[in-house]
């Protein structure tokens, strides 16, 4: 079963990286990319709402903290290929340090 943003946020990193899509072939990568794009749109809507609410706060600017699912941006860059994400030189660093993004 493919994931939504909330499920991907709650999932462990390995599961989040799959977005609920099994496999590594072209069909799985296309589906995973489609799911990643949908989750990115969900993420953007949540971020926009958080910034809107922050802008309405008591006269001062607050940078909202809106976590994204692990590896989401990297999966988008890799067009759904888990192998390409794992092969990225910064992957081990990202796994070891929470919140780190791959370059």
Image (spheres, rainbow, N blue to C red):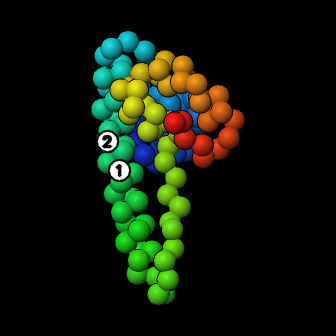
Residue topped by disc 1? 42
| Mark 1 residue crowding within 10 angstroms, few (<14) / some (14–19) / many (20+) | some
Q: Secondary structure at mark 2?
A: helix
In the depicted view, which residue is nearer to us: 35 or 72?
72
Left or right: 97 with respect to 61? right
Tell me if I can see residue 2 in this picture. Answer: no
Q: Quadrant of residue 48?
A: bottom left
Q: Quadrant of the N terminus?
A: top left
The answer to whether mark 1 and mark 2 are in CB contact below 8 A is yes
x%, y% of residue 50?
A: 42, 66
x%, y% of residue 30?
A: 30, 23
Give me the disc on residue 38: 2
x%, y% of residue 24?
A: 43, 15
Residue at position x 34%, y 57% in the image: 45
| Mark 2 residue crowding within 10 angstroms, few (<14) / some (14–19) / many (20+) | some
Q: Quadrant of residue 22?
A: top left
Q: Quadrant of residue 12?
A: top right
x%, y% of residue 16?
A: 51, 35
Q: Secondary structure at mark 1?
A: helix
Q: Is residue 28 above or below residue 77?
A: above
């Amino acid at each position: 079963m493919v994931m939504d943003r909330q499920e991907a946020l709650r999932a462990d990193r390995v599961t989040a990286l799959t977005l609920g899509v099994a496999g590594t072939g072209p069909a799985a990568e296309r589906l995973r990319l489609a799911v990643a794009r949908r989750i990115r749109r969900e993420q953007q809507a949540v971020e926009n709402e958080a910034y809107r609410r922050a802008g309405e706060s008591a006269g001062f600017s607050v940078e909202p903290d809106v976590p994204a699912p692990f590896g989401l941006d990297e999966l988008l860059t890799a067009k759904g290929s888990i192998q390409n994400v794992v092969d990225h030189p910064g992957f081990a660093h990202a796994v070891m340090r929470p919140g780190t993004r791959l370059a």
